[in-house]
Image: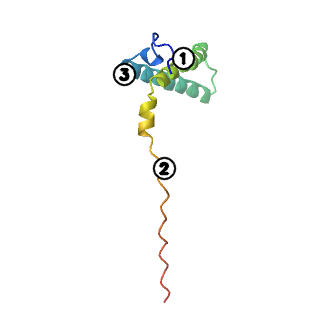
Amino acid sequence: MNENPSSPGLGAIISNLAVRRFIYSTYVLALLVVGAAQVALTSLGMTNPDWLVATLAVLGYLGVPVAGLAVANTSKKVADATAQPEAAAAPQPAAPQPAVV
């Protein structure tokens, strides 16, 4: 993938797994809290305050680099190794027929 060996790949941006996990967790938690605030205010028939609208816009914008970081640190080798081939459909035994007396 990396044509130029002198430049690091995207996976080298944040190589520490704990830091990446913190970024992902913080982002998801912020989305949940801010999204819940918007749902609560809207369900009460209130208008959304400007700070909430701006926060939602910023979180949406930050989704692109957070997702890019996640994709860059997903190893294709690991994904290929864990992919399981589909099992051939085994014939199912016939259902037992009720006895006629």
Q: Which mark is residue 73?
A: none
Element class at badge 2: loop
* Alpha carbon separation for disc pair 2 and 3: 31 Å
Residue 24 in percent (x, y) is at 44, 23
Q: Vertical placement of 43 versus 48: above or below?
A: below
Mark earlier in primary sequence (1, 3): 3
The residue that mark 3 highlights is 17
* Alpha carbon separation for disc pair 1 and 3: 19 Å
The residue that mark 2 highlights is 86
How would you rate the neighbour count of disc 3 (Cα within 10 Å): few for under 14, some for 14-19, many for 20 or more?
few
* Identity, as a three-letter code, of the amino acid under mark 2: Glu
Element class at badge 3: helix
* Identity, as a three-letter code, of the amino acid under mark 1: Leu
- CB-based contact (under 8 Å), mark 1 and mark 2: no
Front residue of this view, candidates 22 and 53: 22
Residue 56 in percent (x, y) is at 57, 19
Q: Is residue 33 in view?
A: no
Residue drawn at point x = 57 percent, y = 28 percent: 39
Residue drawn at point x = 47 percent, y = 76 percent: 96
From this viewpoint, which residue is outermost toward the bottom? Answer: 101
Task: Specify the quadrant of the image occupied by residue 50.
Answer: top right
Residue 100 in percent (x, y) is at 50, 87
The residue that mark 1 highlights is 62
From the image, state whether disc 2 or disc 3 is nearer to you: 2
Residue 38 in percent (x, y) is at 57, 24
Mark earlier in primary sequence (2, 3): 3
Element class at badge 1: helix
Task: Specify the quadrant of the image occupied by residue 79.
Answer: top left
